[in-house]
Image (spheres, rainbow, N blue to C red):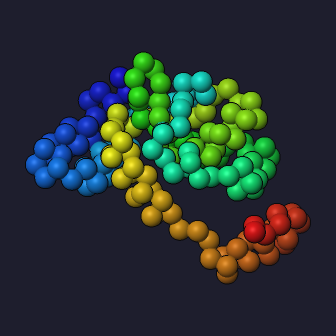
Amino acid sequence: MVGDGCRGAEARSSARSVDNRPRRTVLICYRDCMKHPHTGKRIPISRIAPDPDSVHSKYSLAADDSDLRASIQEFGIMSGLLVCPSGKGRYLIIDGERRYRIARDIGLRALECTILPAMDAAERERLRVELYMTHKPLTQKERSRQRRRLLELGVTPPAPSR
């Protein structure tokens, strides 16, 4: 199993039994596990599934994905999915459901994934929240600088997002 010998999995079980607070535990596991060589595995798309507890499963609309779809069609998936085992060689998506959905729709057969140890629904959601909370979108000034730089390089910048 991918997570075998991972100190993160041990930290998860011991921290959970002491104070029963999985948030801190998941971050320990994530940080610890990311130090180990179980990243970057190419997984057939048929073995990956959206997490039924993910907000993207219920609320993301196809119209919201048009910019991402255009990017994936032009450049491919530049950042792999974050997944955990769900049994019998299958994986649940922790981060990257929109990329997965678009890849499936355009016919990709396998995706690069970082595999974390198995987690329960609460641990997956707490990690997902932590990932979303640490993402910093570009400021208007940074976007303007990028557009100017592309123009300087002779590249037509994409239309501003809605």
**Residue 32 appears anywhere in the view:** no
Q: Specify whether 126 is left or right of 160.
A: left
Q: Is residue 161 visible?
A: yes
- Give the x, y percent position of residue 117: 35, 35
In the rendered structure, the answer to whether residue 83 lies left or right of residue 127 reads right
| Vertical position of residue 69 compared to residue 10: above or below | below
Instruction: From this view, report whether residue 7 is shown above or below residue 129.
Output: above
Residue 42 % position (x, y) = 56, 29
Position of residue 2 relative to residue 122, above or below, is above
- How many numbered marks appear? 0
Q: Nearer the viewer, residue 80 or 52?
A: 52
Residue 56 percent coordinates (x, y): 56, 49
Residue that lies at the very extreme toward the front in this rendered image? 58
Which residue is pictured at 79% across the width and 50% down the height?
70
Please name the residue shown 45% across and 20% down the image: 89
- Residue at 37% x, 27% y is 2
**What residue do we see at 75% from left, 69% from top?**
162
Q: Nearer the viewer, residue 57 or 158?
A: 57
Indicate left or right for 120 with 62 as reference.
left
The outermost residue toward the bottom is: 141
Location of the N terminus by quadrant is top left
Give the farthest residue toward the left.
18
Q: Is residue 73 above or below residue 48?
A: below
